[in-house]
Amino acid sequence: MSSTNASPQILLTGATGYIGGSVLTSLLNSPSPVLSAATITCLVRGQDRAVKLTSAYGDRVRPVVYKDLDDIEATVAAAAQHDVVINATLGYHPASAQALLRGLAQRKASTGRDVWMIQTSGTSNLADRPVTRIWVEDQEGREFDDATDDVYGYEKDRETDKPYLQRTTELGVVDTGLELGVKTLVIMSPTIFGTGTGLFHNTSIQIPAYTLCVLRHGHAVVVGDGKGVWDHVHMKDLADLYLIMVWQIVEKGGESVPSGKKGIIFSGNGRHSWLEMTQAVAATLHEEGKIAGPQVQSIGVPEAAKVLSLYLGGVENEEYIELGFASNARTVSSVARNLGWKPTRGEDAWKEALRHDVKYVLESKV
């Protein structure tokens, strides 16, 4: 889109979720003259959610109610009225992502302006399988740098070897965007932690889900040796990154924002091993008198798929458990930092959030 457009039309999906709700707050609180004058359209399920959004934010938001992610016709129609779409709902729903792109293509055809889609994805797309050794990297401790590595090409090779739904969705966004003339930016995030700022869901998913699994199992577990390393990022820092990217697009025409095959960027701002994470959860649960000891037991992937199945909604999936609790996915967020992103919440915030999430589960009495 053009930087001369004083009233950008922005559509956000997932506004009732952890990521989307925090992104919405950041957009609404932006000091940018263009963004502060913009109304954010939110595609939501249920009139009750629409009412809650308008009650809180007034005419700064415009809720559009649809059935669900499979309501393709409504999704296309909504996107066709907007210049920028931020897709912060499930990163593994190809049909809804494609619908948003088709709608944006219609918008471009009617206005003649550039249109953008910001797609939410995750670094499990790059993760190895170190316990089963189904996929291991030639270079131990490999890091991916979004400024220098061909992330798109790597993902294409991995997808050819074995499809993975979130990666399938992401690559489909990039490829279809190129085909339709829609500019795409993928924000690929690691473990997200910390309290969000939205109206609905403000607690991360991973740590509370693991905590529940430990409570039901009776003691803490780690998959394999727990030496796998992932990055993490605070939800507020991540929301700031989305804001910076939207600001770059609506006020500067996206001149510096990479798109297409180059437009896959990272958001990590710290690292942890799975053993460190599980030990921190176990220590807090032991302090609270909820488990007998702080020890963490090593288990294999098949057993972990059973013990940690709650993380996947009760489904026993060995691939997803190994990717989500044992793998390596190290990234360097060079592009975001070069564009002005300055995350401020580091290791102290990470440790505090671990304890907070554990206590949240205990206080919720889930």
Image (cartoon, rainbow, N blue to C red):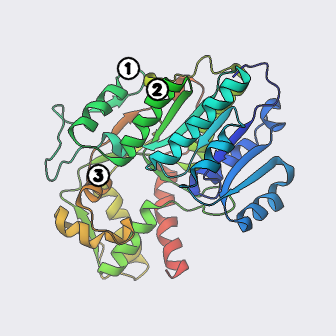
Q: In this view, does 302 lie above or below 346?
A: below
- Is any atom of residue 265 visible in this view? no
Q: Locate residue 194, reporting x and y percent.
A: 54, 56
Amino acid residing under circle 1: Thr
**Mark 3 Cα-neighbour bin, 10 Å: few <14, some 14–19, many ≥20:** many
In terms of depth relative to the viewer, which is nearer, 331 or 128?
Answer: 128
* Label 2–label 3 contact, CB within 8 A: no
Amino acid residing under circle 3: Leu
In terms of depth relative to the viewer, which is nearer, 239 or 317?
Answer: 317
Q: Earlier in the sequence, mark 2 or mark 3?
A: 3
Amino acid residing under circle 2: Ser
Q: How far is the residue under mark 1 from the one under mark 3?
A: 24 Å
**Mark 2 Cα-neighbour bin, 10 Å: few <14, some 14–19, many ≥20:** some
- Is any atom of residue 273 visible in this view? yes
Q: Which of marks 1 and 2 is nearer the N terminus?
A: 1
Q: What element carries label 1?
A: loop
Side of 130 relative to 249 (left or right): left
In terms of depth relative to the viewer, which is nearer, 333 or 88?
Answer: 88
Q: Which mark is residue 148?
A: 1
**Mark 1 Cα-neighbour bin, 10 Å: few <14, some 14–19, many ≥20:** few
* Label 1–label 2 contact, CB within 8 A: yes
Q: Earlier in the sequence, mark 1 or mark 3?
A: 1
* Label 1–label 3 contact, CB within 8 A: no
